[in-house]
Amino acid sequence: MKTAVLVDGAFFLKRLRFFYGKDPSFKINDANVIVNLLEKLCYYHMNECNNDTKPQEKTYGKKHELYRIFFYDCPPLMKKAHYPISKKTIDFSKTPQAILRLQIHEALKRKPKTAIRLGRLSDVGDWCIKSDVLKEILNEKRKITSLSDFSDDDFYYDVKQKSIDMKIGIDITSLAYKKLVERIVLIAGDSDFVPAAKLARREGIMFILDPMWSAISPDLFEHIDGLISTIKRPKLKTVTQN
């Protein structure tokens, strides 16, 4: 059974940082390490298993054939802006995050059976307060009386991705109508895929969702044929945190 694995790149990298961001043994800023792990997690889906099985540790039943890994992402932000508090200039193209993202894209291009689908970032962005900082303020753990009580590190620059959901939907539709695969695995965490998933299932395609242990809405189960996360689940109570 041929299987295509579709990966929401921004979601994957965010969850990876959640799992391994504080693990000194994992090179979270090494593009090759990240890409090799992505490839490994995708190949784990080639093993027939159910939700109670750990695909990375156990194989039973038949194996599937990988058709292709599709990785959806946007090029990093390449413009300049000013920090909200200090007003200093920041060149986003020279940040470690931008450099790492470009390295990941280059590493993926060298992988067999892998295709990159690039969208674009919105031309307009805004500085937003970080969620943990906001929680501290709301819980009265941090008092703010003026702007001087903030620092640049309390904010992040938020830009929206464009065309990613559309590209995922188009590829699912194309795979289904052209009968290129019998099974689709989507590594993502939101419900924007539902219309495309419904179409694929009407065409007889088995649709598996891998949310990387992120919590999903109960009503999504009626639109998928299985829920399987292949990344090793850490022993943390906050594992379902997005």
Image: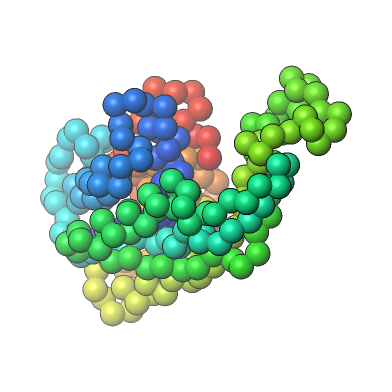
Q: Is residue 46 visible?
A: yes
Height in image: 161 above or below 10?
below
Q: Position of residue 138 (x, y in %)?
A: 77, 28
Percent position of residue 3, x then y: 23, 61
As drawn, the residue found furthest toward the front would be 88
Can you say whether 9 is above or below 203 in the image?
Answer: above
Residue found at x 46% / y 68%: 119
Q: Position of residue 12 (x, y in %)?
A: 40, 48
Number of marks:
0
Nearer-the-camera pick, 146 or 207: 146
Where residue 236 sits: x, y (%)? Answer: 44, 23
Residue at 53% x, 35% y: name it: 241
Q: Quadrant of residue 109?
A: bottom left
Question: Which sits in the foreground, 239 or 156?
Answer: 156
Left or right, 115 with respect to 138, comes to left
- Up the image or down, 6 lies above or below 97; here it is below
**Colour scheme used in the picture?**
rainbow
Question: At 63% across and 56% down in the image, what residue appears?
Answer: 81
Q: Is 194 placed above or below 59 here?
A: below
The one of 208 and 71 positioned closer to us in this rendering: 71
